[in-house]
Image: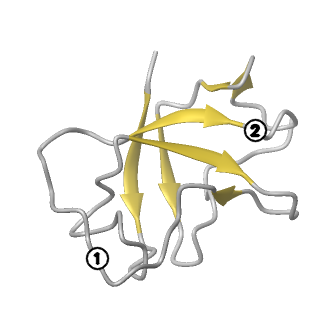
Amino acid sequence: MTTAVRSCAATSCSFNHDGCNALAITIAGAEAQPTCGTFVQLDARRPMTGEASSVGACHRMECSYNSDLVCTAEGIEVTDTANCATYTVS
């Protein structure tokens, strides 16, 4: 199962160009709210390729959607501050 990145509001991310266009993102972070570990702010933008973005790995073991480092949600949303809005503590 792959979990789609349904939306990304982090407009300063180089992988967000009219939607997330990273092939796979990692959800990580040690903060209370997990962050997109793939977030990068550069002067370049990856162009849209038509390939759907997905969650490649989730490092937040306490999330109810995490099963052996794999996200089991149908899809996730990433906020403007690159946080995973779908994150739910189990």
x and y, in percent, of residue 51 in the image: 19, 39
Amino acid type, label 1: Ala
Query: Sequence order check: which comes first, mark 2 or mark 1?
Result: 1
Identify the image quadrant of residue 68.
Answer: top right
In the picture, the disc for residue 56 is none
x and y, in percent, of residue 9 in the image: 42, 73
x and y, in percent, of residue 65 in the image: 69, 30
Q: Is residue 55 above or below residue 12?
A: above
Secondary structure of the residue carrying numbered label 2: loop
Q: CA distance from mark 2 to mark 1?
A: 27 Å
Quadrant occupied by the C terminus: top right
Left or right placement of residue 49 versus residue 88 in this view:
left
Q: Residue at x 46, y 15 (%)?
A: 1
In the image, 88 versus 58, the foreground residue is: 58
Left or right placement of residue 59 versus residue 83 in this view:
right
Q: Residue at x 24, y 63 (%)?
A: 46
In the image, 37 versus 67, the foreground residue is: 37
The residue pinned by badge 1 equals: 44
The residue carrying pointer 1 sits among few (fewer than 14), some (14 to 19) or many (20 or more) residues within 10 Å by Cα, namely few
Q: Residue at x 87, y 63 (%)?
A: 32
Secondary structure of the residue carrying numbered label 1: loop
In the image, 29 versus 8, the foreground residue is: 29
The residue carrying pointer 2 sits among few (fewer than 14), some (14 to 19) or many (20 or more) residues within 10 Å by Cα, namely some
Amino acid type, label 2: His
x and y, in percent, of residue 54 in the image: 41, 37
Q: Is residue 90 above or below residue 86?
A: above
The residue pinned by badge 2 equals: 59
Q: Is residue 41 above or below residue 57?
A: below
